[in-house]
Amino acid sequence: MELHLPTLVVTAVGLNVLLGILMLVIYQVRRTQKSFLTWACACFVFALAAVAASLRVYIDQPWLTIFTADVLIVLSPLLALHGLRQYQQQAPVSLKLVALVISYTALPLVLLYHAPIHAQTFTSVVCASVYLFAAVYILTIRQAPALTKAVLFLLFLVHGGLMLGMAGMLFQNLSAAKIAMIEPILNLMLMTHLYLTTGTAMLFPVFAFSLSEQRLLELANFDDLTKMYNRRAFWERSSLLLAKNRLLRKPFAVLMIDVDYFKAINDRYGHAAGDACLKRIADIIREHLREQDVAARVGGEEFAVAMPNADHNQAELLGMQICQQVEQEKFEVAGQKIKLTVSIGIIYSSNSRRELAELLNAADTALYDAKASGRNRLVFG
Ligand SMILES: Nc1nc2c(ncn2[C@@H]2O[C@H](COP(=O)(O)OP(=O)(O)OP(=O)(O)O)[C@@H](O)[C@H]2O)c(=O)[nH]1
């Protein structure tokens, strides 16, 4: 295959400058998202690096075409990674890691830049490490949508592998004569590197926006503490299930679950301990649900479960299991063992004819009765 490296370099530089400008425009609109500014810098730095490196053929100034170019080549993915960290943490992120890697890169390059092949081998190893680190890092971004995450992971992984391959080839052929022999392969690798960098940069805005979209959905539907549905999402989902069951004349049950004397737990052990208990109770509820059940945290220390197509015994069994497990559990918080109980009100509709609001009110009344008659029990409404 005929390689037109100069054309490709010009295209890559042009695209990265354009991408950098695009990120700057986004940053103007979203001043709070510093990551766009960092990604813009990464694009400009990459374009500068490509220009500096390509001048090698025309001028003999190794401090610029090798030392400066190689430092910039390492700086670009480091900045991209820094932007990802800023986006994930949504808080100021220290530049320590960037400064550290750049210092440790620049120092050996001061000694190596008069031997271009050695310098290029070293730079490839550092870049490979940064890309592989970024691949692992992207997997830790929990709330990222799976597809964008997988594509970015693959891009970083392939890029890391490519850089390692490049370093390996350069290392085995350290003499200039041998390098001339493998030049077409090196050029191909360089081309792939330019494509991969530009492709990755293009993905950043997509990644950032899909992450915000995902976060918005999470905020709209999920409770932050327990990761259960919130009251709104519970209402939406159980209304649909109830309507479907009504058509099929199938039964429907609702459980309202409330932690007993929870105020005393907060007062005695602190709010953080209370939070940890709520999280554990949410897990206990989750562990006993059937696949089709919908559970939610509908109030401070109140949970609800909708059980479509469940008979009376199944609703009672779920209530008993939750009651018993909470009672048996020793909630370990900050080295202390806390005992808790829950009260449960259950309402059962054999043909799902009642409205959701009516069922929830009836389950609430049953819960009130469970509290009034001594707590740590379940009562059917
Ligand atoms: N830790 C923590 N506490 C919460 C949260 N939401 C509500 N609470 C607390 O839950 C407690 C509920 O207290 P009450 O409604 O008086 O009920 P209780 O003490 O559980 O008593 P009974 O329900 O009558 O058994 C209050 O102290 C709230 O501050 C939360 O997200 N985290």
Image (tube, rainbow, N blue to C red):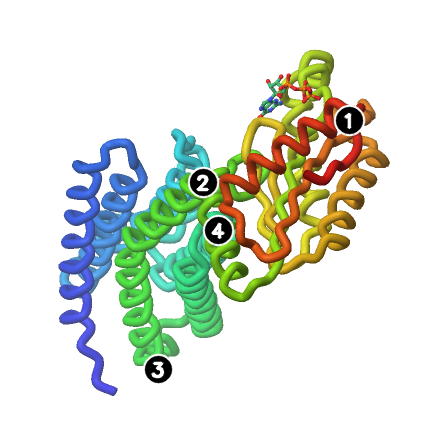
Mark 4 → mark 3, Cα distance in angstroms:
65 Å
Residue designated by label 4: 237
Q: Nearer the viewer, residue 355 or 124?
A: 355
Instruction: Give the mark toward the camera: 2 or 3.
Output: 2
Q: Earlier in the sequence, mark 1 or mark 2?
A: 2
Is there any visible trace of residue 106 in the rendered image?
Answer: no
How far across and down, in percent of the image, does residue 365 sit?
Answer: 63, 31
How far across and down, in percent of the image, does residue 93 sit?
Answer: 41, 32
Label 4: state its secondary structure: helix
Quadrant location of residue 103? Answer: top left
Question: Tag 1: residue type?
Answer: Arg
Residue designated by label 1: 375
Q: Nearer the viewer, residue 208 or 82?
A: 208
Q: Earlier in the sequence, mark 2 or mark 3?
A: 3
Disc 3 + disc 1, Cβ < 8 Å? no
Label 1: state its secondary structure: loop
Q: Is mark 3 within 8 Å of ligand 1?
A: no
Residue 181: assigned label: 3
Instruction: Give the mark toward the camera: 4 or 3.
Output: 4
Residue 9: assigned label: none
How far across and down, in percent of the image, does residue 373 sit?
Answer: 78, 25
**Viewed as shown, does residue 376 lie left or right of 209?**
right
Q: Nearer the viewer, residue 153 or 256?
A: 256
Residue, far bottom: 1
Question: Tag 3: residue type?
Answer: Met
Q: Is mark 1 within 8 Å of ligand 1?
A: yes
- Assess disc 3: are there few (<14), some (14-19) or many (≥20) residues with their C-alpha within 10 Å of its C-alpha: few
Question: Tag 4: residue type?
Answer: Arg
Q: What residue appears at the point 51 percent right and 50 percent down from the top-left corner?
A: 238
How far across and down, in percent of the image, does residue 193 sit?
Answer: 32, 66
Residue designated by label 2: 232
**Viewed as shown, does residue 328 lie left or right of 363?**
right
